[in-house]
Amino acid sequence: MNGWTLDDIEMPVPTEDLNIKNYRDALDDKGFVTEDINLLRDALIALTLSKNLLLRGPTGSGKTKLAESLAEKLRLPMESINCSVDLDAEALLGFKTLVTDNGHSEIQFIEGPVVRAMREGHLLYIDEINMARPETLPILNSILDYRRQLTNPFTAETVVAHPRFRVIAAINEGYVGTLPMNEALRNRFIVIDVPYLSGAPLKALIEARTQLGNEQVINQFVALSADIVAATKVGEVSEEAASIRALLDACDLAAYIPALRAVARAIAAKLDDEREKTVVMNLAETYFTQA
């Protein structure tokens, strides 16, 4: 089995029944790949039922790629929010600014991603939602429950969500800088766990999306990935080391430079802890020789 994509799943109901806009995002591949077709099926059904989706998984497991693929499958443009401790209401909803036209000045409100997504019926993607300060997020509560609306504090306008409006959030639990997710907020989501890809599906992904063509080296990278994931589970390295994104970068480099050096550049060098770098390189040296 080379893994499943959303192209393998029929829409649970016709898109015309959802009143979904005829839109297709320009993905240059088949999108998110998984070993578990039920992960895709359940995520798609949840969204077609207007449920909010929370993608939970380690860094680099493909949560953003899954959100992009779901948006493409539903033919919905995607508005993105990258959460941090600096996130505030203006970053979510928009801001007022002074605009001058032909000598006449007026204050205009520039809509933010939440308001745009609600008004236009787009998919709203909230990345690393547990990186935001807890006091910032309650403003989202009313758009995530049955009300599907909010009162914009900057304009006093009540914005009612378009029927096509959908919400996906992503979370890395236990990651540096994250906070426990508020229970009232978590209860507004359907949770989908997104694990790292492994085995034959990972091999097929490397073959399809990197420049690396040497089957032996590809098999070695698949085995190395499994070893790094195992090391994350016992706390020897952080989840960053097991990122599929980083692995694909290493495979691309390995098509042109020695594989061990590619691992050093694309995986180990991204880690802050010298001990973790050593663990990754020691694992890589069991598969690749110095050059």
Image (tube, rainbow, N blue to C red):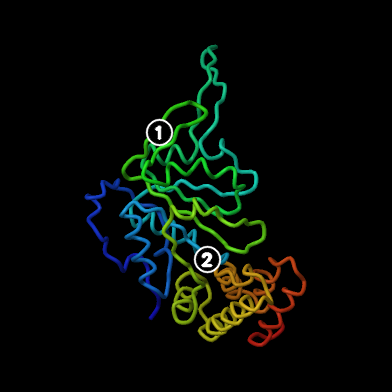
* Three-letter residue code for mark 1: Val
Q: Secondary structure at mark 1?
A: strand
126 left or right of 40? right
Q: Earlier in the sequence, mark 1 or mark 2?
A: 2
Q: Quadrant of residue 254?
A: bottom right
Residue situated furthest top in the rendering: 103
111 left or right, relative to 131: left
To which residue does mark 2 refer?
A: 57
Image position of 88 with respect to 212: above or below = above
Q: Which residue is mark 1?
A: 159
Q: Quadrant of the C terminus?
A: bottom right
Image quadrant in which you'd find residue 223: bottom right
Image coordinates of residue 16 in percent, x first then y, are 22, 50
- Residue 35 % position (x, y): 42, 75
Label 2 crowd bin: few (<14), some (14–19), many (20+), radius 10 Å: some
**Whole-percent x, y for residue 247 in the image:** 58, 72
Q: Mark 1 and mark 2: span between their CA atoms?
A: 32 Å
Q: Amino acid at mark 2?
A: Gly
Question: Against 7, is 180 above or below?
Answer: above
